[in-house]
Image (spheres, grey):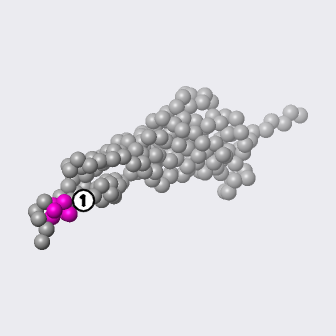
Amino acid sequence: MLAPAAAAAAAAPTHAELEQAARSSLTLPSPSIETAPGAGKLALVGLPVWVWLGDGGASIGDQSTSAAVKGVTVTAHASVASLTYDMGDGTTITCHGAGTPYQASYGDKPSPTCGHTYTTSSANQPGGEYSIRATATWTVNWNSTNGLGGQFTVTPDAAVAQLRVGELQVVNE
């Protein structure tokens, strides 16, 4: 029979068990991509494309949760460390924050926070569109009521949006 102190130590959760509980308790959303020109519209080579999060940044807002393991409470706090867009043409951009939603009054100016200008048409891409993939990388700090804690990163599934990019050619007669 174990002494009371040994029994308590044997029942105490390990660092790995607490970290796993922190990981399992988090449900991190995928970002919601918006572009201008938007879905179903044609972007043009050489003109800026604006990219932002359609949910106003809610999908990259801080997240917190708690879980219990063998009588010990573990609390996890997640925040977005980076937001990266693979624009489908070989270009990757990193944006800070949710981006700026496009308004018609901006005309053909580039986005002040998150955008890209395509140099080639998407005509040779599958479906004739570029696939834009948004990936949020989260940093998670966790601690527990028994004094253990740590940090890890999580990258949930990327969100995908399609964008058709064409070329405008002027013929002079």
Nearer the observer, 78 or 72: 72
Residue carrying label 1: 13
Is disc 1 placed on a helix, strand or loop? Answer: loop
Nearer the observer, 23 or 168: 23
At a point 69% along the width and 53% down the height, the residue shown is: 125
Is most of the magenta stretch helix, strand or loop? Answer: helix
Q: Is residue 23 above or below residue 140?
A: below
Is residue 4 inside the magenta stretch? Answer: no
Segment colored magenta: 6-11
Toward the bottom, the furthest residue is 1
Q: Quadrant of the C terminus?
A: top right
Residue type pointed to by label 1: Pro
Nearer the observer, 134 or 11: 11
Q: Is residue 22 visible?
A: yes
Is residue 7 inside the magenta stretch? Answer: yes
Q: Position of residue 122 (x, y in %)?
A: 70, 48
Q: Is residue 160 above or below residue 61?
A: below
Q: Position of residue 40 (x, y in %)?
A: 60, 48
Nearer the observer, 71 or 14: 14
At a point 63% along the width and 48% down the height, the residue shown is: 88
Toward the right, the furthest residue is 173
Q: Quadrant of the N terminus?
A: bottom left
At a point 46% along the width and 46% down the height, the residue shown is: 137
Q: Does 3 sit left or right of 157 as displayed? A: left
- Residue 17 in which image quadrant: bottom left
Q: Position of residue 55 (x, y in %)?
A: 42, 43
Q: Position of residue 12 (x, y in %)?
A: 21, 59
Q: Is residue 36 visible?
A: no
At a point 61% along the width and 37% down the height, the residue shown is: 116
Q: Residues within 10 Å of mark 1 (few under 14, many from 20)?
A: some
